[in-house]
Amino acid sequence: MNTHSDGPLIDSFGRTVSYVRLSVTDRCDFRCVYCMSEDMTFVPRAQVLTLEELGQIARAFAELQIKKIRITGGEPLVKNNVLKLFDEIGAMPGINELTLTTNGSQLTRMAADLKASGVSRINISLDTLKADKFKELTRTGDISKVLAGIDAAIKAKFEKIKINAVILKNRNHDEVTDLVNFAIERELDITFIEEMPLGKVSDRSREEAYYSSDRIKEDLAQSFELIETTESTGGPARYIKIPNTKTKVGFISPHSHNFCSTCNRVRVTAEGLLLLCLGQEHSVDLKRVIRANPGDIEKLKKTIRDAMSIKPEGHDFDITAKPIIFRHMNSTGG
Ligand code: SAM
Ligand code: SF4
């Protein structure tokens, strides 16, 4: 572990942490079946980090040699005045990649401003191409807004646009080929995500809906030639290429492939908890530090650096067990 005050963040397993995912809100205009329960209770507003606090946290990480920040949520684009935060981080020295994960519902009005603020890459969630299925999976969403949002993002010319699709057996597993064709036609990348057991979202068992990345690959192999690559973006996804297309197809497979040994990231929840691992409860309360020491960036940096010593070696996801992680994905920051 690096305890030197100017060096990069290094944990006790020798992994350099260079990437932070900031959840800016736990609120969302959708209620996706794998992410939230139907009657979600959200954190009281006073407990959610303000834009100013989020800016301070981003600055502390930038001074600790974090290079990449992804803004996520909840739905980040429903937070009031969130563009101010994008403008601030986009102009922050040291941050050379500012990215966003969104459900796409607000992109028709915001894509151009996000691009102007310095967002380079954007992930847009889309699990199905069918309007009725979309309503079923998101409980409240309107697919036409999201499709128009994807068009707006394409028009805004982000460096990279990636579709994220969580695949559930007997819900949308029959659409993987159509989703890849959708991505190919628009020259987008697409990543398929195995459902992770975060929080209780309904009475159904997560195991029953499990559809592995390997099965998705088998399904895709019926229609496409798939070329395995060793390419990595430093994250958990593994990629394949489809010849004569610009589309990369990624797979995030926490159950079938453990990706912890190369983990380079930490998360900050909407309530300001620094989470050292998506699949474990190890955390440090940054909001408490900020609110007890207003404006003291050195204190915040020291808290973050000290937290590296408790970053666990890996997650313990087990879809056959009862959820051991009681946080939902929306408060965690997916
Ligand atoms: N609201 C934005 C969105 O949907 O893209 C950003 C936040 S969302 C929590 C980030 C990603 O996490 C989405 O791609 C979503 O599909 C995924 N996600 C949510 N709950 C999940 C779960 N239980 N397992 C796997 N992925 C999940
Ligand atoms: Fe909202 Fe994203 Fe969670 Fe869906 S996955 S409920 S869009 S935060």
Image (tube, rainbow, N blue to C red):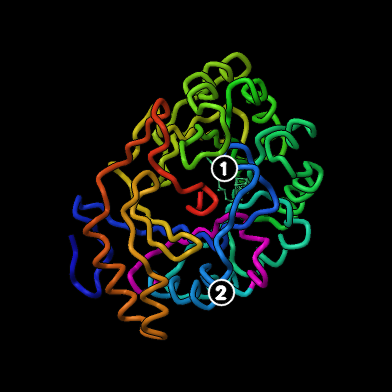
> Disc 2, ligand 1: is the CB inside 8 Å?
no
- Quadrant holding the N terminus: bottom left
Magenta segment:
62-83
Instruction: Identify the residue at horizontal 75%, vertical 46% (top origin).
Output: 146
In this rendering, is residue 164 above or below 334? above
| Residue topped by disc 2 | 51
Magenta stretch containing residue 222, yes or no?
A: no
Residue 35: mark:
1
Instruction: Identify the residue at horizontal 62%, vertical 75% (top origin).
Output: 84
In the picture, measured across the screen, residue 89 lies left or right of residue 108, that is: left
Rendered location of residue 198, percent (x, y): 47, 41
Between disc 2 and disc 1, the foreground one is 1
> Disc 1, ligand 2: is the CB inside 8 Å?
yes
Other-residue count near label 1 (Cα within 10 Å), few / some / many at <14 / 14–19 / ≥20 = many
Rendered location of residue 331, percent (x, y): 51, 54
Q: CA distance from mark 2 to mark 1?
A: 24 Å
Q: SS at mark 1?
A: loop
Q: Quick one: 277 or 46, which is closer to the camera?
A: 46
Q: Quick one: 293 or 304, which is closer to the camera?
A: 293
> Does residue 87 appear in this view?
yes
In this view, the residue farthest toward the top is 222
Residue type beneath disc 2: Leu
In the picture, measured across the screen, residue 215 lies left or right of residue 136, that is: left
Residue 64: mark:
none
In the picture, measured across the screen, residue 40 lies left or right of residue 70, that is: right
Residue type beneath disc 1: Cys
Instruction: Identify the residue at horizontal 32%, vertical 37% (top origin).
Output: 316
Q: Are marks 2 and 1 in contact (CB under 8 Å)?
A: no
Rendered location of residue 295, percent (x, y): 41, 86
